[in-house]
Amino acid sequence: MFEAVLTGSVLKVPHGFFTRLGGVSPAPYDSLNCSLSSQDDPANVVENRARVARAIGVAPDHLLGLKQTHSDITVPVTAETPLWVAGTGQAGDALVTDRPEIGVGVITADCGPVLLSSDDGRIVGAAHAGWRGAVGGILESVVAQMVALGATGISAVVGPCIAPESYEVGPDMRDAVLAKDAAGENFFRSAPREGHFLFDLPGYCGFRLEQAGVRTVQILGVDTLTDQRFFSHRRRTLAGGGHIGHQISAIRPLASPLG
């Protein structure tokens, strides 16, 4: 069904970093737009998300998401959680679950999608990590919630996002990062434009995951700005603006532990 779905070799559970290809939305949302907050026809987005849900083995109404706000909020979905509690109307930037019939996903268009799994595959998480979320603690938050559910030996994959060579930022953004995390200095280097910097978002996400105790971190190293298979806010901005869709990254746990 899909022309391209990326996966991480360290994750042994159903998951995918989906591209913008393989959906039903017309331009400028073409075609696998999974953002319910876009101005795309909602029926198109529902169908696109249903295709993603089926691809990871869950029913369409069991692929959950959140109203993403660049926060440090992780929402756990357990046996006691009504599904509407983890619907797209609730604010947060990560979901974790131990329910094998549930898929959890995040939408991005340059920010870092991070998918995580326990070593036995029974507990998974999905996090949306832009620079604000990463420096604000969303990755530590998702790891902590997975551990609270019993996860051990956590592995994580940082999926397609804006690459260091594409992510030019001003001194204000750099100062904001360093005000909260001095170690962030290691992920900036000078940009060709004087007074600007290039920021290594995937590398920084990987660093924060390792600091949080994640055993194995894989960075796919796919640049959403230059790879036309993906939606990109930065590409849209450079082109003069306009409407845009978002790709989704999703994962679900296993019913039985990995052997």
Image (cartoon, rainbow, N blue to C red):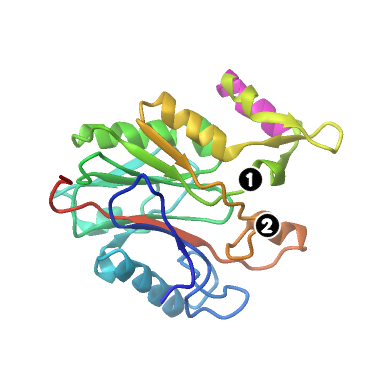
Q: Which is the main secondary structure of the residues drawn in magenta?
A: helix
Please name the amino acid that badge 2 sits on: Thr
The residue that appears at 59% across and 18% down in the rendered structure is 182
Q: Nearer the viewer, residue 84 or 14?
A: 14
Q: Position of residue 154 (x, y in %)?
A: 30, 35
- On whether residue 89 falls in the magenta region, the answer is no
Q: Is residue 185 above or below residue 258?
A: above
Q: Indicate the quadrant containing the C terminus: top left, top right, bottom left or bottom right.
A: top left
Mark 2: few/some/many CA within 10 Å (<14, 14-19, 20+): some
Task: Using the rendered image of the protein, determine whether residue 55 is visible from the camera's viewpoint.
Answer: yes
Magenta segment, which residues?
Answer: 172-182
Q: Which residue is mark 2?
A: 226
Q: Residue at x 68, y 29 (%)?
A: 188
Q: Is residue 226 above or below residue 152?
A: below
In terms of image quadrants, where is residue 187?
top right
* Pointer 1 residue: 163
Q: Residue at x 20, y 42 (%)?
A: 120
Mark 2 or 1, nearer chain start: 1
